[in-house]
């Protein structure tokens, strides 16, 4: 009975928060209707898991609102063969979404306790195409570069050079850039001789802490 209720809430989330705002990639919509977002938040907040807002997950971190997660995911245009780097594992919800759509996800979290918690949930859910690391996300994961796509789930004051270096030519990066008061969600596409930038929307993410 409870699972049916969550299933209905996911269906409403997909239609009311994603489709109505222009999320139209069929694979992205299918995955959002499948991944149990309520398992990535504290049990006391599971009744709010599918609402149109972020939620705290402890240690001054948040799980982003579904629309922002979907917009970032859709912008990467994943086709199940990509090697993806995620900066900021957080709750692990975005990680699960990426793992459904990519060949392998490498995810870096600065806070070891959050990384361990996310890993436990994701492994319980059966994900086997995710590699985890704890550390400074702004440094990326150089030993596994280059990446076809990079998703950064924390706001940088400027684009970290190591992440650009680790992005493959033709690859795409979604990253919030700005300070605590004004941030823009950017889509970057790396060319051999240039970097295409597209401003997707205003946003509000926790800061990317760099060592």
Image (cartoon, helix red, strand yellow):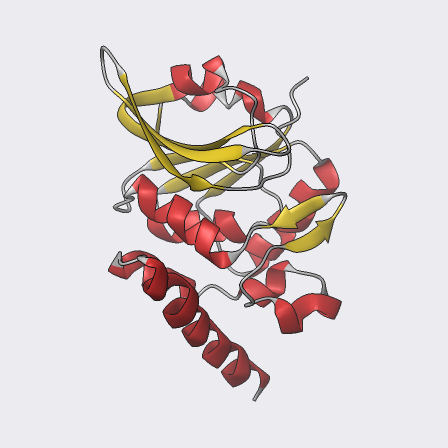
Q: Furthest-front residue in view?
A: 181
In-front residue for pair 98/75: 75
Return the x and y of residue 81 as percentages of the image width and height.
27, 41
Name the residue rendered at 56%, 67% in the picture.
51
Q: Residue at x 54, y 53 (%)?
A: 93
Residue drawn at 74 percent across, 43 percent down: 60
Looking at the picture, does residue 65 appear above or below residue 199?
below
Q: Percent from the top left, x then y, of residue 2?
A: 59, 84
Residue situated furthest bottom in the rendering = 1
Write the residue at 24% across / 18% down. 191
Which of the 4 image quarters holds residue 82?
Answer: top left
Farthest top residue? 193
The quarter of the image holding the N terminus is: bottom right
Q: Looking at the image, which is closer to me, 180 or 124? A: 180
Q: Where's the C terminus, which quadrant?
A: top right
Q: Find residue 54 and report its horizontal and vertical position in percent.
A: 60, 55
Classify residue 33 as left or right of residue 210: left
């Amino acid at each position: 009975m409870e699972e049916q209720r969550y299933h209905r809430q996911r269906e409403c989330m997909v239609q009311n928060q994603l489709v109505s705002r222009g999320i139209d990639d069929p694979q992205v919509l299918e995955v959002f209707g499948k991944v149990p977002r309520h398992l990535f938040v504290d049990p006391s907040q599971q009744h709010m898991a599918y609402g149109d807002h972020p939620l705290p997950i402890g240690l001054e971190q948040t799980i982003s609102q579904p629309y922002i997660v979907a917009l970032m995911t859709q912008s990467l245009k994943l086709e199940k063969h990509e090697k993806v780097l995620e900066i900021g594992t957080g709750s692990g919800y975005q990680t699960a979404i990426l793992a459904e759509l990519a060949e392998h996800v490498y995810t870096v979290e600065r806070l070891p306790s959050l990384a361990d918690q996310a890993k436990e949930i994701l492994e319980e859910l059966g994900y086997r195409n995710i590699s985890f690391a704890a550390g400074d996300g702004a440094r990326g994961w150089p030993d596994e570069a280059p990446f076809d796509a990079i998703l950064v789930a924390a706001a940088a004051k400027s684009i970290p050079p190591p992440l650009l270096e680790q992005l493959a030519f033709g690859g795409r990066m979604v990253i919030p850039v700005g300070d605590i008061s004004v941030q823009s969600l950017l889509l970057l596409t790396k060319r051999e001789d240039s970097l295409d930038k597209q401003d997707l929307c205003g946003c509000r993410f926790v800061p990317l802490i760099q060592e």
